[in-house]
Image (cartoon, grey):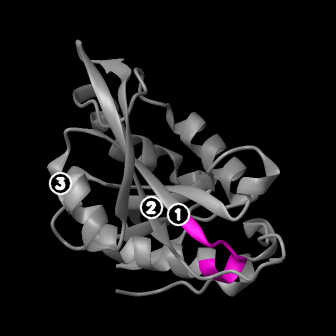
Amino acid sequence: MTIRIARAADGEALAKIYAPIVENTFISFEETPPTAAEMARRVEATLETHPWLVVEQAGTAVAFAYATAHRARAAYKWSCDVSVYVGEEARRQGLAGRLYKHLFDTLIRQGFGSVFAGIALPNEASVGFHERVGFEPVGTYPRVGFKNGSWRDVGWWSRSLQELPDNPSPPLPFGENRHAFKQCGS
């Protein structure tokens, strides 16, 4: 097992991981699974500013985690949203926790201070996982999304990465920080 930076060439594997979540659950509010080409485009766009990591087993990505801007306004630039997805065949191996550890370490090196995770509710597994890795609940958007025939709440969880100074430097864009990320084994 290797944790590494995602590549556009991972698009097909990432689409395969994500499609069942879009098609069969309300965890993602997307209605149509993105194609391999769309996933490749998302990877390339994300890597300009934020990390997108994968777990590779036997030459194929089986799990992924990434960060994106929390909000567009400049005052939010030290915060980001994070997501993690594990393919059905790779679950229950601790991959999500390992991905988040490497993602958070990378975000700290970039200069981010906080991460946020939005979770469509109910989802005891995701809530439990996020709380085990240090997230705390901060609020709920009630009935904010409609999927699979029902209105869904989205809960928000927050985790501090590091204490930032009163006058922090802007976070480094990931594209300029790639060299600081080391590929990791298990």
Q: Is residue 120 left or right of residue 7?
A: left
What x and y, as percent, mark residue 81? Answer: 54, 54
Residue 95 part of the magenta segment: no
The residue sitting at 31% across, 63% down in the picture is 130
Residue 19 visible to an observer of this rendering: yes
Q: Earlier in the sequence, mark 2 or mark 3?
A: 3
Residue 109 part of the magenta segment: yes
Residues at circles 1 and 2 in contact by the CB criterion of under 8 Å: yes
The residue sitting at 74% across, 59% down in the picture is 77
Q: Is residue 111 above or below residue 54?
A: below
Q: Quadrant of the N terminus?
A: bottom left
Q: Nearer the viewer, mark 2 or mark 3?
A: 2
* Residue identified by numbered label 3: 125
* Residue identified by numbered label 2: 158
Q: In this view, which residue lies farthest toward the front?
A: 166
How dense is the environment of label 2, judged by Cα within 10 Å: few (below 14), some, or many (20 and up)? many
User: Total of numbered circles in the picture?
Assistant: 3
Q: Earlier in the sequence, mark 1 or mark 3?
A: 1
Q: Nearer the viewer, mark 1 or mark 2?
A: 2
Q: Secondary structure at mark 1?
A: strand
Q: Is residue 51 above or below residue 68?
A: below
